[in-house]
Amino acid sequence: MTLWYGAALGTVLVLFSSAAYLRYRAAAWQSFDADLRSNLDTLQGALLDELGETPEAVERPANSVLSDNPLQRTATLTLEEFRLNGLYAEIRRGREGEVPLARIPGAGPGGDQPLSPEAAKQAAARSGQLSSLALAGGWQAVARTIELPVEPPESVLLVVAGRKTLVEETLASIRRALLEFGAAGLLLAVGGGYWLATRALRPIDAMTRQAGRMAASPSAPVPRRFDVRNSGDELGRLASTFNLLLERIELSMARTKGFVADAAHELKTPVSIVRIGAELALSGDRSPEEYREALRAIGLESTHLSDLVSDLTLLAEGELLEQPLERRLVDLGEIVREVARSLGGVAAGRRIRIEIETPPGLELRGDERLLRRAAVNLLENAVKFSPTGARVGVYLSRESDRVVLRVLDEAPVLSEEERQRVFERFYRSQRSRSEGIPGSGLGLAIVQWAAALHGGVVRVEPRSPRGNAFIIELPAA
């Protein structure tokens, strides 16, 4: 590919040189023709000066006949005074230039001989007008037939010729130089283009090799990022963008792997309990009470399994759908009061008192289903972890442009590490595991996810002397 770049650059140079040569060639021939025409005009002016500027100057004497000698002497004197540098000139008489009058001796189109009758006739074909013709020996001539101011009128053919050899030799030398320089320029262009293209494509080649190693050995301990050597140019920014994309992909894959592993771990226990309970119940004859106990255990674990599947489905739906929210104007205070009433029976069973403080008219735009689920998880979590006879407070307020929901429990104060991890998926504290408190570890993760979808945040703060405050801040309508 790099050779093509060099060849293209060399081709451009050759075409440019060829165009320049053609322009110079046309200009050289135009200059050559213009010089011939200028000398022809000068020769015509000199001849007329010799004859005199008025016809009376060359009138014939009365009762006499003007011979050819005076006109020939005038033509000869004109050419003697008219010195041409490297040019040939000739003056001929007659409508077809059939009678030679004078010429510059020496080398000309015919050597020591005057123009041939055919050439003279061809030159005189356009009377009074300039004509151009190619002569033997590499000569180019311009000619014009004029009428002399004498009585009777006399036609004279003026011819000026120049050797084309000098122009052709000059053009040939320029052509050779252009060919030589063009060949050298082509080689330099190919070499320079190869060097430039190699230098420009080297970072891309390095990125390609790194990507190939990543693709060939996805599990090998190779760097999972592109090496960014110059972050200021376009390729550096491209590599940085790819690194950011790879980082997000790795984070997503790590979360997916962790999610799948945790889900499998959480699903394994209730499924095993259901299977073992059913196998034990079917392994032999059992009393009705034993069957009822086995079915009760299967029912409890089935409920746990159903809740877990529901939570997993909710989280998966939120990650797969582009628009998981169905936004409309909702009253968060009304939702909180309804949730508290629905959990009243569970709280009463543990003699836990729920106190609610929600001013009216706290509205926001959001998904009522997700907001209700977040309130249920927070309040259920507070009731579940608070000791018997405790008090759970639910307070809703508006602070500036935010709606703030606080759920206060009297559970043991979470440590700093637990506060940082409590919103992770499938995370369960040591206390909940040791005391056998039911749960999947997804409730608070769903709360954080729902708050983030609504443009809000959730956090947990310790209370004194005991208890924790779970706080959700959402943008008001």
Image (cartoon, rainbow, N blue to C red):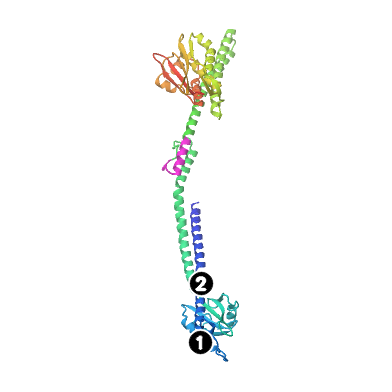
Q: Which amino acid type is shown beneath numbered disc 1?
A: Arg
Circle 1: element type = helix
Q: Which residue is mark 2?
A: 34
Rendered location of residue 259, percent (x, y):
50, 26
Q: Which residues are magenta?
A: 227-246
Secondary structure mostly seen in magenta is helix
In front here: 453 or 133? 133
State whether residue 229 is above or below residue 82: above
Residue 353 in percent (x, y) is at 48, 10
Task: Work out whether mark 1 precedes mark 2 in sequence or the reverse, and give the earlier one.
Answer: 2
Q: Which residue is mark 1?
A: 73
Residue 242 drawn in magenta: yes
Q: How far apart, in angstroms, are the residues tagged by discs 1 and 2?
A: 29 Å
Residue in the image at 43% along x and 44% along y: 233
Residue 144 colored magenta?
Answer: no
At x 58% / y 10%, what residue is drawn?
292
